[in-house]
Image (cartoon, helix red, strand yellow):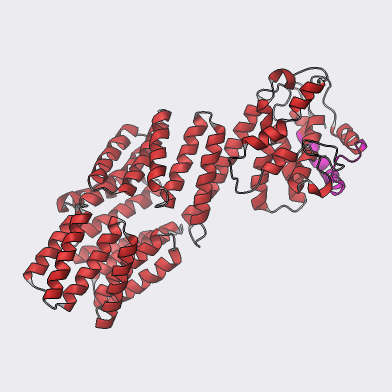
């Protein structure tokens, strides 16, 4: 390699670390011309490998994959294990970026084999770090830490401080996940000092954004915002849109925690717009955070829509195996869904003085019957949400009608009987992972076809709605109403038996076997404070 080519590669390397991607790409083009002119095959291969990594970091995945694939082919033909390792490492990162965890792992392991064969400490260290990232994603934190420590040891032997800073940053994030905040802070600080000394602006920006999460965990929102400001300024300067999107997400979290909800809303929407179609994980995380903000503003339906979009994105990511982190977030999202629909259900009941606790009890009764009828556990999660929301349409019914002490007039009854349709319409924009809308629309349909709003009969009424109807009627009868006392469970069951044609016969017989188990819930809900429990 001649001095001119070496000088061009050094310049391109410095431009990369400054985040000057177009300048670095142009310098690599000049380096390629220099190597080709000098018929330096080894030099051409070096340039192609580095240029592939440059375009990968700049976000041009297609060109990066082409260059790194070419580099791998040429390196293996020439027996250049070190360059083959670097090409494989870059290809693995590209696989990882699109969620292909298994494909990435296979390429990382192949890269490590080539790096060990070449005795290349840098490539071994970088590959060990990346295997640590995969272990972290899979929830194998001890394994991840071992990989990071091994990678750091190899990189320190090689005397590559910039690469060491990257590993230290990842180790800090692992300790942050474990809530080892002091260890995380010390590792971030060490990484920051290394990068500042080496002029690695890009990694400094990454650390600033990550430290914002640390400061939030420590309850220091002002420092979190300052750290975000520094990271955002760097990524604005180098035009790294996705990293700017990550910063915008953290701004949203910071403003949410400090009660500045309008600013949180604005920044999270900007993060979502930046990530859309480019980074599904960032988009999903920002949607979930937006849902929290919308809920705090009382915008329940919009919050539900944001949760749904987050869930769809996380489910897409979870299609790849062993993604423990995403699986955990899906579980958190389902808890968010249930918490939101519970609160929404309570807001429905706030209009009706006689239905306090109705949605929760109906959900308990209906889920127990659905479980006994063989509904799978995963479906039960969403079925419970549908049960909580079944009376959503009552928010459109005037309180005077809901709380009227006597019989409803024909016009009032017509308004009341429209609430299932109103609820269905309110949920039309929410694409739940499991279809809850039939429960909302058809929970007043009867087995004999005499129900409303559509007069469905028999098993044309969806099974979830048939289950829900039994639970809904049982709770209505055992609850206090303006015109009567609550019935005992035995009295309620007798009245339900006398209502021939109302219920699916098989489900009703199954419910009958559960009544002794469910009766205490009904009695406890309407027992006055001074009234003793039955012996």
Q: Is residue 512 visible?
A: yes
User: Considering only vertical position in the picture, is 80 above or below 185?
Assistant: below
Report the span colored magenta: 498-521
Tell me if 114 is positioned left or right of 320 in this view: left
Which of 115 and 285 lies nearest the eye of the viewer?
285
Q: Is residue 534 left or right of residue 274?
A: right
Toward which corner of the image does residue 122 lie, by quadrant?
bottom left
Which of the 4 image quadrants contains residue 401?
top right
In the image, residue 339 lies at what x, y percent? 58, 37
Is residue 513 found inside the magenta-colored segment of the image?
A: yes
Give the percent coordinates (x, y) of residue 30.
14, 65
- In reply to whether residue 144 is colored magenta, the answer given is no
Q: Is residue 345 left or right of residue 204?
A: right
Task: Describe residue 50's horizontal placement relative to residue 60 as left or right.
Answer: left
- Tell me the quarter of the picture where residue 223 sits: top left
Q: Residue at x 38, y 39 (%)?
A: 270
| Residue drawn at x 19%, y 58% as measured from the top left | 24
Image quarter (top left, top right, bottom left or bottom right) of the C terminus? top right
Secondary structure that dominates the magenta span: helix
Q: Is residue 270 above or below residue 3?
A: above
Q: Quadrant of the N terminus?
A: bottom left
Residue at 24%, 82% in the rendered image: 78
Q: Is residue 154 visible?
A: no
Q: Is residue 375 above or below residue 150?
A: above
Q: Position of residue 152 (x, y in %)?
A: 27, 61
Q: Position of residue 222 (x, y in %)?
A: 31, 32
């Amino acid at each position: 390699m001649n001095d001119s080519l070496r000088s061009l590669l050094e310049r391109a390397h410095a431009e990369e670390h400054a985040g000057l991607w177009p300048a670095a790409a142009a310098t690599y083009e000049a380096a390629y011309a220099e190597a080709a002119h000098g018929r330096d095959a080894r030099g051409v291969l070096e340039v192609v490998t580095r240029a592939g990594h440059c375009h990968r970091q700049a976000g041009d995945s297609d060109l990066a994959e082409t260059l790194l694939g070419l580099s791998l082919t040429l390196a293996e033909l020439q027996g250049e294990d070190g360059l083959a390792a670097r090409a494989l490492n870059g290809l693995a990162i590209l696989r990882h970026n699109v969620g292909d965890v298994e494909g990435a792992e296979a390429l990382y392991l192949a890269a490590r084999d080539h790096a060990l064969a070449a005795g290349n400490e840098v490539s071994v260290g970088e590959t060990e770090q990346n295997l640590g990232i995969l272990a972290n994603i899979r929830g194998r934190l001890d394994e991840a830490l071992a990989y990071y420590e091994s990678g750091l040891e190899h990189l320190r032997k090689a005397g590559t401080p910039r690469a060491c800073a990257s590993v230290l940053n990842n180790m800090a994030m692992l300790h942050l996940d474990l809530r080892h905040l002091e260890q995380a802070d010390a590792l971030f600080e060490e990484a920051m000092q290394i990068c500042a000394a080496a002029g690695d602006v890009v990694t400094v920006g990454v650390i600033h954004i990550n430290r914002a999460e640390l400061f939030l965990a420590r309850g220091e929102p002002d420092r979190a915002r300052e750290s975000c400001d520094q990271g955002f300024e760097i990524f604005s300067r180098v035009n790294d849109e996705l990293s700017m999107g990550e910063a915008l997400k953290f701004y949203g979290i910071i403003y949410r925690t400090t009660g500045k909800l309008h600013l949180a809303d604005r920044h999270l929407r900007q993060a979502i717009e930046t990530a859309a179609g480019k980074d599904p994980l960032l988009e999903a995380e920002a949607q979930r955070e937006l849902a929290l903000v919308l809920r705090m503003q009382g915008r329940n339906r919009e919050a539900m829509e944001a949760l749904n979009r987050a869930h769809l994105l996380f489910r897409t990511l979870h299609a790849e195996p062993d993604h423990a982190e995403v699986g955990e977030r899906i579980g958190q999202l389902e808890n968010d869904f249930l918490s939101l629909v519970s609160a929404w259900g309570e807001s429905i009941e706030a209009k009706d003085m006689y239905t306090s606790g109705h949605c929760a009890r109906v959900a308990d009764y209906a889920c127990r019957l659905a479980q006994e009828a063989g509904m799978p556990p995963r479906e039960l999660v969403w079925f419970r949400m549908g049960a909580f929301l079944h009376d959503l349409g009552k928010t459109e019914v005037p309180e005077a009608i809901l709380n009227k002490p006597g019989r409803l007039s024909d016009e009032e009854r017509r308004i009341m009987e429209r609430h299932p349709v109103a609820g269905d319409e309110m949920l039309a924009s929410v694409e739940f992972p499991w279809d809850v809308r039939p429960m909302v629309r058809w929970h007043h349909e009867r087995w004999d076809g005499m129900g409303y709003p559509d007069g469905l009969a028999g098993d044309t009424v969806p099974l979830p709605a048939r289950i829900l109807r039994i639970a809904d009627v049982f709770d209505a009868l055992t609850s206090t109403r303006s015109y009567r006392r609550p019935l005992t469970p035995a009295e309620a069951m007798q009245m339900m038996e006398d209502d021939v044609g109302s219920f699916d016969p098989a489900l009703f017989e199954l419910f009958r076997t559960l009544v002794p188990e469910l009766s205490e819930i009904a009695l406890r809900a309407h027992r006055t404070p001074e009234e003793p429990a039955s012996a």
